[in-house]
Structure formats: structure tokens, C-alpha cells
Amino acid sequence: MKQSNKAVLLFDLDGTLLDSAPDLAKAVNHMLVTLNLKEFSQEIIRGWVGNGARTLVERALQHSSKHNVLNKTFSEAEISSALAIFLKYYQHNLCSESVLYKGVKETLIALKDKGYRLAIITNKPAEFITPIIAGYDLTGLFELLVGGNSLTERKPHPLPLLHACKVLDVTIDQCIMIGDSKNDIIAARAANMQSIGLTYGYNYGEDISVFKPDWCLDTFPELLPLLHKVFC
């Protein structure tokens, strides 16, 4: 059964468009070494990605503390100090080893050519989005970029999605949220918006289908035939 056409596609960034774990892991380990704490493998750090920079830093500090049998509780001031170390390093290494997932650029261009309006809704700090978009030659594809510190709330709160609807002057029914994390799906449901869950990326080892997105896809290029079949 065909559904009403969609005008706007809202994309998560990390784990959806970009495999950013390599550069995030380097920044996390730089922070830990600076603080004389234990480093971790990229694969372990991958499991901490998805809730924004501060949460990533908190998880790294907690795990390093446990490994060193410190069982230390870090104060807000200590977390903020560690975050500053992480962010300073990361801002100079945004596009060093991270890569777009297969077919992302080509699919985004095709979607834009078909008349879809594209936006990014991520929990990554807003100041990093534009440099990353430029670094992977995606400039000009997105009408709106919303970061984790752009508003008073971030995903899984629905505010970023509702904000996008307001700024782009479209209804919730005209939008669809696309992401790899439960935060994307929960935010979409809270906004009463349809969603597409991607089975790759960062979802803390959980199956994205458990959170009941309207559709699940294994690869990014599958978006094109799905949108054509369901909405055109």
C-alpha cells in the first residue's frame, strides 16, 4: 500500500552516514593517556559511541577507572576537563581515518536529485558537523544541520526532530527519521514520525529492530528502492 509522499529526510550522522569510530577512538585514547588512564581498543570504544561527546567521555573515564581498580566517581568539573582535552584533539582530527559508509555519497546525491530535502540531526556537537560535511565533499546536500548542543534537548528527545519540521516548514507526516541507533527511533516515535532503522553502525550491540522502526535496512543504498516503492 502506497503512503503519502515524503518531502524531508532527516539523517543521523555517526553510524549512519559516517563510520567515525576510528577518529573518535583516537581522541578518546589521547584524552585517557593525557590523564594517565588506560587506553582501549577501537572496537571497545565503538560500543560507547552514539549519545554525544560528553557521554562518550564519561563512559571512557568510567571504564578506565574500573580497569585500574580505582572505582573513582568523576566530578562534573573533572568530566568537563576531560571533555575539553577530547574535543581539542578531535577538532583537528575529524576526517583522518573515518570513512563514509559504502554508497552514502552516491545515494544522498540521488535522493537530492529526486527532489528530497535532506537534513542532519545528530548528537555530535554542532561545531563539528560542517567541517565533516566539507571533509567528505557533502557540502550543499543538506538544508539543515542540528547538533547535540544546538537545542536544549537532544535525541532521544523529539525536540530536534520537531525543530527541523518547524525550520523547514513541513509537517511531521512529510518527514522520516533515518538512523542506526535506538535514540533515532525513540525520538521519531516520540515525535509521531516514521523512521527507518539501519542495522549497521552504533547501537550498543542491540538489534535496531527491537525498537520497532517502520522499516529496517542493512545498507544505505537500499533507501532509494524503499522510498520509491513505499512513497512514490
Image: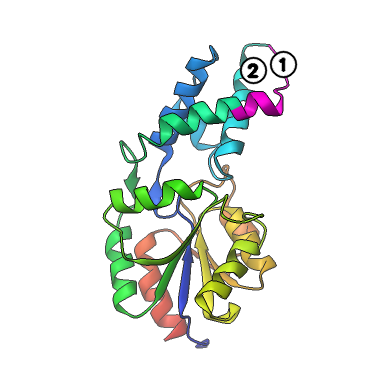
Binning the other alpha carbons within 10 Å of mark 2 as few (below 14), some (14 to 19) or many (20 upward) gives: some
Residue 218: mark in rendering: none
Callout 1–callout 2 Cβ contact below 8 Å: yes
In the image: residue 186, left or right of residue 230: right
Query: From the viewer's perspective, is 124 left or right of 95?
Result: right
Q: Which residues are magenta?
A: 70-80
Q: At x 63% / y 27%, what residue is drawn? A: 79
**Secondary structure state at the residue bearing disc 2:** helix
Q: Nearer the viewer, residue 114 or 138?
A: 138
- Across and down, in percent, residue 145 comes to 46, 60
Q: Position of residue 125 (x, y in %)?
A: 51, 46
Between the residue at mark 1 and the residue at mark 2, the CA separation in whole angstroms equals 6 Å
Which residue, given by chain and number where applicable, does mark 1 sit on? 71
Which of the 4 quarters of the picture holds residue 68? top right
Task: Name the residue: 40% across, 54% down.
Answer: 17
Q: Position of residue 9 (x, y in %)?
A: 46, 71
Q: Is residue 7 magenta?
A: no
Can see residue 40?
no
Q: Which numbered circle lies on residue 65?
A: 2
